[in-house]
Image (tube, helix red, strand yellow):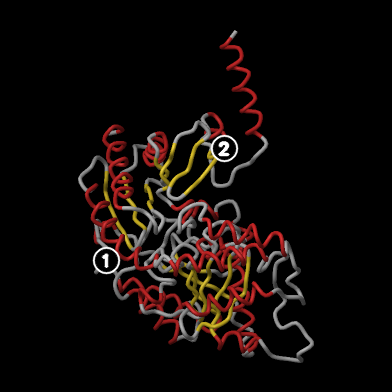
Amino acid sequence: MESSNNADEDHAIADNLEALWMPFTHNRLFKKKPRLIEKASGMYYESSDGRKVLDGISGLWCSNVGHNHPKISEAVKSQLDVLDFSPPFQVGHGLGFELANELIKVAPESINHVFFTNSGSEACDTAMKIALAYYQGLGEDRRYRFIGREKGYHGVGFGGISVGGIDANRKHYQKALLPDTKHICHTHNLSEMAFSKGQPRWGAHLADDLEELLKGNAASEVAGVIVEPMQGSAGVIVPPDGYLEKIRAICDRHNVLLIFDEVITGFGRLGEWFSPDRFGVVPDMITFAKGVTNGVIPLGGVLVNDQVFQSIMVGPEHLVEFFHGYTYSGHPLACAAGIAAMEVYRDEDLLSKARRLEQELEHQIHTLQGEPHVVDIRNLGMACAVEFSSKPNQPSVRAMEIFQKCFERGLMIRYTGDIIAIGPALVASTKEIEFIIETIREVVRDLA
C-alpha cells in the first residue's frame, strides 16, 4: 500500500512540473529527476528535500551580495506599501532618478545617462537602438550594421542573438536575424592560453580581426561593436592583455561606437563597479542587469556617454526624442532594490573584499590542474572556469554529469558545453571557496 502511495505522489509531482516550459533546460530529462529550490539565505539554497546547497554561481551571476539580504528585502517590502507601480511614459517617480544618479556616480566619468530596461537582453537591444539613433542624429543614416564576437552572449532578443556568437542560440533563427551582422574572432585558444591566471599575455593581436573586418565591410556603414569585457556565458573567457585597448583604438579610428556588455561583469564581479576601472578602457555605452538589484527584482539598463545622449536630444522639445521603452522601465520596486543593493555594496566594502577573495579563488581553482580530463582552467575576478575534454561522441555530457553530482553533494555550479563555471557571491568565505573546489575535485575523480 505504501509503494502505491509513493507512486501516486510521484505522478502528482510529474503532472505539476509538466505545465512549465523551462528556459535553457533539457525539460524532459530534468523532469525525470528535478532539482527544486525552496529557500535561500546568504551563500546557501535549501532544496525541496531539506538539504543545504552552497550557491557557487551567485544564482545566475546576479546574487552578488548573497541571498535574502535584509536591507534589500526590507527596501522592497517597504516600497510595496508606498508605490507599487507608476507608468514610465510622461510620468516619473523619485526612485528612478535616485538610482540613475547613484549609477552615474560609479560609472566612468564620461558616462552620465541611464536608460532603464528589465533585463540584459532588453539592455542589449536598447543599446543597439541608441547607436542607430545616434548616427541618425549626426545625419549618418548609412550606419546600420553591428559587429559582435564569436562565443559572445548578449541575451535572447533578436538584436542580442544577431550580435551574439553562440551557435546554439542562433541556429533556429538564422533567416530572421539582423542582416549584415558580422562577428570578430573569439579569444579562446587552448594551445596558447591554457591554465592562464588572470589575463593571458598572449592574444592582444586577435583584436586586429576587427580592423580587417571594418576594412573589408564598409566601416562607414557600421554603427557599433558590442563585446563582453570578459565572456561569461561561454565559460569565463578572459581578455588577453592589451586586447580591449586595441578594440577601443580601432573603434575610434573608424568612428564606430563601442558597447560593453557588463550584465555579468558589473557590480563587483571583477572587483570594481564596472570593467573600465579594471581594464582602463572606457566604452561609449555599458549594458547592465543582474547584480544591480542582486537579482531580487528584474532590472537592467544602458549607461550612455554624453556625446551619444546629446546627439539624440534634438528637435522640438514637445516631441519624443527616442521612440523606445518598456512598461516596466525603472519599476519602483526594482529601483528600491537597486538603491538598497548599491548601499550594501558600499557599506560592506564588497568590492574590496572581492579583490581580496579573487586571489584565494585563483589559488584554489588552479589546484584542479592535473585532475582527470581537465584541459584548461581560467579565472578573473570572482569568476573562473574549468574546461574538460569531451566524452567521445557525447559533447557536454561530462560537464552535465559534474553539475548533477555537485548538486547532489550540496554545491550549485553552472555548465556550458564541457565547461563548468564558478562565480561565488562577494560575501563568500575562504572555507566556502575551499568547499566549492574540493567538491568539484571529489566529483571529477569519482566520475573518471
- Residue 265 occupies which quadrant of the picture? bottom left
Does 428 sit above or below residue 162? above
Provide residue 262's location: percent of width, then percent of height: 47, 67
Does 88 sit above or below residue 315? above
Residue bearing mark 2:
27
Whether residue 415 is visible: no
Q: Residue at x 56, y 33 (%)?
A: 28
Provide residue 222's location: percent of width, then percent of height: 54, 79
* Secondary structure category for the residue under label 1: loop
Q: Residue at x 34, y 37 (%)?
A: 392
Whether residue 246 is visible: yes
Q: Residue at x 49, y 77 (%)?
A: 217
Q: Residue at x 41, y 44 (%)?
A: 54
Q: Is residue 243 left or right of residue 404?
A: left
Q: Nearer the viewer, residue 448 or 440?
A: 440
Quadrant, the C terminus: top left
Type of residue at label 2? Answer: Asn
* Secondary structure category for the residue under label 2: helix
Q: Using the numbered discs, state the Cα–Cα distance from disc 2 to disc 1 in whole angstroms.
A: 37 Å
Q: Is residue 326 left or right of residue 138?
A: right
Does 408 sit above or below residue 218? above
Type of residue at label 1? Answer: Pro
Q: Nearer the viewer, residue 192 or 77?
A: 77
Residue bearing mark 1:
200
Provide residue 81's location: percent of width, then percent of height: 71, 60
Does 311 sit above or below residue 198? below
